[in-house]
Image (cartoon, grey):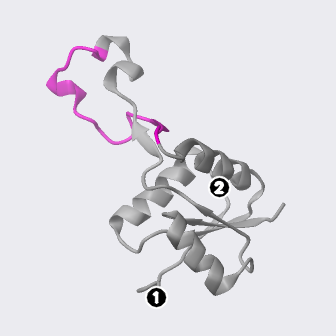
Amino acid sequence: MTDQIVITEKTSQAQDVRAAVGGRYGAILPAEGHLFDLVEPEEVSADWKRWTAVLLRPDGLYGTKPATGGNKSSKLKAIRDALRGAKRVWLATDCDREGQLIGQEILEHYGYRGTVMRVIFTAQD
């Protein structure tokens, strides 16, 4: 098992990164867009099933849960398993706010505490 992994936002991006750098930075694992959803208020507390203004989603109050559909569960499992032994993660998602969030959600959900390196690129062609 490698102690480094690269997380990309999508499969095509993983293929491009793999073609460019091979396995030099560890296993290259694609996400599939957002792999997590916010938990619903009633999943946090049964008392919150009925909506009120108090339930507006304050930061830190709601956790995340794995999203469903497509190949999301298999991609999450591969990333989760790789994170267990990783000392360094190369975050190679799209270089925008959405890409940053996708990668950050993964790392936060699994409580990753190793080194994170952000890969910045302007084009994949």
Indicate the amino acid at tag 2: Arg
Residue 14 appearing in the image: yes
Please, what is the dominant secondary structure of the magenta stretch?
loop
Quadrant location of residue 39?
A: top left
Indicate the amino acid at tag 1: Asp
Q: Nearer the viewer, residue 125 or 87?
A: 125
Can you give x and y, in whole percent of width and height, for residue 37 in the image?
A: 40, 39
Q: Nearer the viewer, residue 59 or 27?
A: 27
**Residue at the location (31% across, 11% down)?**
47
Neighbour tally class for label 1: few under 14, some 14-19, many 20 plus, Cα within 10 Å: few
Can you give x and y, in whole percent of width and height, for residue 104 in the image?
A: 48, 57
Can you give x and y, in whole percent of width and height, for residue 91 in the image?
A: 55, 68
**Residue at the location (49% across, 63% down)?**
10
Marking on residue 19: none
Marking on residue 113: 2
Residue 111 appearing in the image: no
Mark pair 2, 1: CA separation: 32 Å
Residue 51 shown in magenta: yes
Span colored in magenta: 48-69
**Residue at the location (57% across, 70% down)?**
14
**Residue at the location (48% across, 63% down)?**
9
Reply above or below: 61 against 32.
above
Q: Viewed as shown, does residue 85 lie left or right of 52?
A: right
User: Residue at label 1?
Assistant: 125
Reply above or below: 40 against 88.
above
Neighbour tally class for label 2: few under 14, some 14-19, many 20 plus, Cα within 10 Å: few
Residue 3 shown in magenta: no
Q: Viewed as shown, does residue 52 lie left or right of 61?
A: left
